[in-house]
Image (cartoon, rainbow, N blue to C red):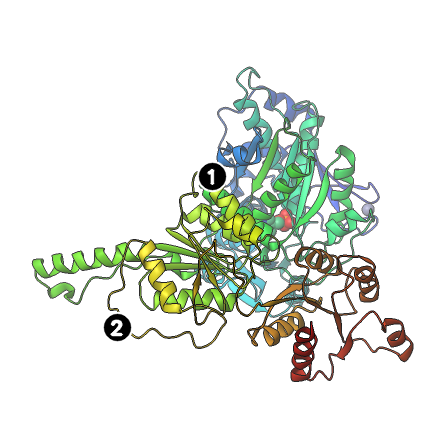
């Protein structure tokens, strides 16, 4: 049965318009936001009788799609993707009703194929031969594939953040690819101008009728599939309690929401789900507006590594999604890149799903909502796994993930025995190569140094992680043969990391070697006792001994004991003795701890490097006042370096707070600021701070000398 499209209605003034061709703006008020309306009664009668014989593509729901001539359909198996109940994820989150709508299983690997199929079919119906679009990546791949099939010429404008692998795929489909060094919103503008100059069709964003209409099919499928999963439901369609999706411009959930509304109108479901819209923290204009209950979302300049979600200016999509969330108790939130990457690794580890970072944003959002109790344990949740990662992007995986097994010289001319010998040697090497060590140290210089030391002698696979949470994740995923662990790290200290490892039956047996700059108290030692294999004091051990210890713990020996070990030339992990854990004598030269609180990460890092290079200090960085406050409370450092211009609290107020708290009152504070400090302000700070350095004319050596002097007096 062909489309039951009846009219196009303006969403602003209600004006009704004919359906062929689809109007690009309202004839009465000029608005570009219009909605397609169908004969729902007739569609309901057909769908209630069952769709068993229908195509397993989006075209299964042809009656409610706006394509009048079905001979124009361009299809390659888009839609009708699996709806799968989670296994490991549900167990880890303690939630039994989590389902994944697996949009990776689409022709070009993302949910955008639905839009590609419908839009390109419509353009073919109209006889359009050349089009222009802008994209953050996946819509481009979908359009390029469907255009290739339909013989339509396609111009794609992308930002330079789109990974080169994706660009190559587009070129392979024959699309013209234009890379813009700028934001996605700028790329859209350039594309629109280009199309206008050449009088070419420009594919609109969330306001495009075929775009939103295409994504309705996600809702239709979910309701139909949930009905099938329910053994006593007699195949009756069902709505979930929650629908979770990662959002950039928002066309996806706008369409899904309309799909559920239509099903409700047709009596196929009995209620609407709650929407959970998730943005990447570095580009979250909608989440910010939602939090402050604003009617419109202010554009932002994106700062996210998840390029696919970098729509800084959501326009009116926000207003529509906000209304949808308000109607049923949904929400709009954001997650950090780190949270998204962790969710991505977890899904691969516990479910066997490899998804792209943009999709993992939805999973990280779901984690958060479950943890906060917003999503209840008995609610049915569908999360859209909106895209595949292929190939995995560089910042997620490093090259060591591929094991390269090479045979000896021989080559093709080698005899059989030579080949056998070569294989033996290669397999022996492989044994070593699959011996895996994870180094968890928040200081990348130290982790690199430890990796180099080990790899200078053995072909081990060494993974470095500079953040404890990622470390936990990686150890659970890789189940390495040994872990090298630092003790003082932000977010979670090494003691806690060690305790979680040892409490986990899957990884509890893995030996953990502690390499740390921390001066240990008796209580610290007690916490390590029985858990850590050995303890090495940074700045106080012989590197050769460490390597030997690791090799022996792993059941090997060093090939040539006279081999001169490159005594670590740079870095802090050099020279002298290993400490027994139970030994109570303090290290000879205690390393002092310093907390730097500065929202300019570059500045914080610079100060850290300056001070750590002396070998006398261990420096922790905080980028907000609140984080700084927490870090000072946690570490009770010997000194604080404080910037006055912080994003959340004024540096002066933080200083005040530090001085009022009995635990932190005596910690000396050095002010380092870019702010012009007036004489009056300086006077107010006097007595609370130790000294003030201005960033603009900072004498680095003077700062170090000053810190040295202050701390040696104590
Ligand atoms: C994999 C993936 N997930 C989510 C999104 C966000 O989708 P929307 O355009 O509906 O905001 C995109 C957008 O390109 C995407 O490619
Ligand atoms: Zn109008």
Quadrant of the snapshot with the C terminus? bottom right
Quadrant of the snapshot with the N terminus? top right
Tag 2 secondary structure: loop
Whether residue 623 is visible, yes or no, is yes
Q: Name the residue under label 2.
A: 562
Q: Quadrant of residue 656?
A: bottom right
Tag 1 secondary structure: helix
Q: Distance between the residues labelled 1 and 2?
A: 48 Å
Q: Percent position (x, y) of residue 188?
A: 66, 62
Farthest residue in the right direction? Answer: 680
Q: Percent position (x, y) of residue 375?
A: 67, 34
Q: Mark 1 points at which residue?
A: 351
In the picture, the disc for residue 600 is none
Question: On the picture, is 708 further left or further right than 436?
Answer: right
Q: Residue at x 37, y 51 (%)?
A: 481
Foreground residue, 111 or 127?
A: 111
Q: Quadrant of residue 131?
A: bottom right
Whether residue 66 is visible, yes or no, is no
Q: Alpha-carbon neighbours of circle 1 within 10 Å: few (<14), some, or many (≥20)?
A: some
Question: On the picture, is 172 further left or further right than 103?
Answer: left
């Amino acid at each position: 049965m062909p489309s039951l499209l009846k009219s196009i209605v303006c969403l602003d003034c209600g004006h009704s318009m004919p359906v062929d061709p689809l109007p690009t703006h309202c004839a009465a008020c000029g608005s570009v936001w219009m909605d397609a309306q169908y004969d729902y009664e007739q569609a309901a009668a057909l769908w209630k009788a069952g769709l068993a014989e229908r195509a397993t593509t989006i075209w299964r729901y042809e009656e409610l799609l706006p394509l009048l001539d079905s001979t124009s359909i361009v299809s390659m198996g888009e839609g009708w993707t699996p709806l799968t109940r989670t296994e490991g994820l549900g167990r880890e989150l303690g939630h039994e009703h989590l389902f994944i709508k697996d949009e990776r299983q689409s022709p070009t690997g993302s949910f955008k194929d639905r839009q590609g199929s419908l839009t390109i079919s419509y353009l073919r119906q109209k006889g359009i031969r050349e089009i222009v679009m802008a994209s953050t990546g996946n819509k481009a791949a979908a359009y390029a594939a469907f255009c290739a099939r339909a013989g339509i010429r396609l111009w794609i404008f992308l930002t330079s953040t789109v990974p080169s692998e994706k660009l190559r795929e587009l070129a392979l489909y024959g699309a013209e690819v234009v890379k813009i060094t700028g934001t996605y919103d700028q790329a859209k503008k350039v594309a629109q101008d280009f199309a206008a100059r050449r009088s070419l069709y420009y594919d609109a964003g969330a306001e495009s009728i075929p775009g939103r209409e295409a994504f309705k099919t996600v809702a239709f499928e979910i309701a139909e599939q949930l009905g099938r999963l329910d053994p006593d439901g007699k195949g009756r369609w069902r709505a979930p309690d929650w629908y979770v999706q990662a959002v950039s411009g928002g066309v996806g959930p706008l369409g899904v929401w309309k799909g559920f509304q239509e099903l409700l109108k047709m009596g196929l479901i009995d209620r609407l789900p709650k929407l959970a819209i998730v943005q990447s923290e570095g580009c979250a204009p909608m989440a910010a507006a939602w939090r402050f209950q604003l009617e419109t979302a202010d554009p932002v300049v994106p700062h996210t590594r998840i390029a696919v979600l970098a729509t800084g200016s959501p326009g009116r999509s926000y207003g529509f999604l906000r209304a949808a969330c308000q109607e049923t108790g949904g929400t709009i939130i954001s997650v950090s890149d780190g949270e998204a990457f962790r969710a991505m690794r977890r899904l691969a580890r516990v479910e066997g799903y490899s998804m792209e970072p943009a999709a993992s944003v939805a999973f990280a959002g779901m984690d958060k909502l479950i943890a906060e109790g917003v999503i209840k344990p008995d609610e049915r949740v569908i999360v859209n796994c909106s895209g595949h990662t292929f190939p995995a992007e560089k910042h997620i995986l490093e090259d060591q993930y591929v094991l390269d097994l090479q045979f000896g010289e021989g080559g093709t001319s080698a005899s059989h025995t030579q080949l056998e010998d070569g294989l033996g040697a290669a397999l022996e090497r492989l044994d070593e190569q699959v011996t895996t060590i994870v180094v968890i140290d928040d200081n990348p210089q130290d982790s690199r140094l430890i990796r180099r030391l080990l790899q200078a002698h053995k072909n081990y696979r060494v993974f470095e992680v500079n953040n404890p949470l990622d470390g936990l994740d990686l150890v659970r995923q890789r189940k390495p043969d040994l872990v090298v662990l630092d003790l003082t790290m932000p977010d979670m200290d090494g003691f806690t990391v060690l305790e979680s490892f040892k409490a986990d039956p899957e990884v509890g047996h893995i030996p953990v070697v502690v390499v740390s700059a921390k001066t240990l108290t008796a209580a610290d030692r007690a916490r390590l006792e029985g858990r850590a294999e050995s303890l090495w004091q940074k700045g106080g051990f012989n590197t050769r001994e460490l390597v030997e210890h690791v090799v022996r713990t792993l059941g090997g020996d060093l090939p040539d004991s006279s081999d001169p070990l490159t005594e670590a030339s740079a870095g802090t992990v050099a020279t002298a003795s290993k400490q027994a854990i139970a030994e109570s004598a303090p290290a000879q030269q205690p390393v002092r701890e310093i907390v730097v609180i500065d929202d300019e990460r570059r500045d914080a890092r610079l100060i850290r490097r300056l001070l750590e290079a002396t070998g006398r200090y261990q420096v922790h960085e905080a980028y907000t006042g609140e984080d700084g406050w927490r870090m000072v409370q946690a570490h009770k450092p010997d000194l604080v370096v404080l910037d006055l211009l912080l994003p959340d609290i004024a540096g002066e107020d933080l200083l005040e707070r530090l001085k009022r708290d009995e635990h932190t009152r005596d910690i000396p504070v050095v002010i380092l600021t870019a702010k012009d400090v007036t004489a009056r302000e300086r006077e107010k700070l006097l007595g609370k701070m130790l000294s003030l350095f201005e960033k603009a004319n900072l004498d680095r050596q003077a700062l170090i000398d000053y810190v040295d002097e202050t701390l040696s007096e104590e």
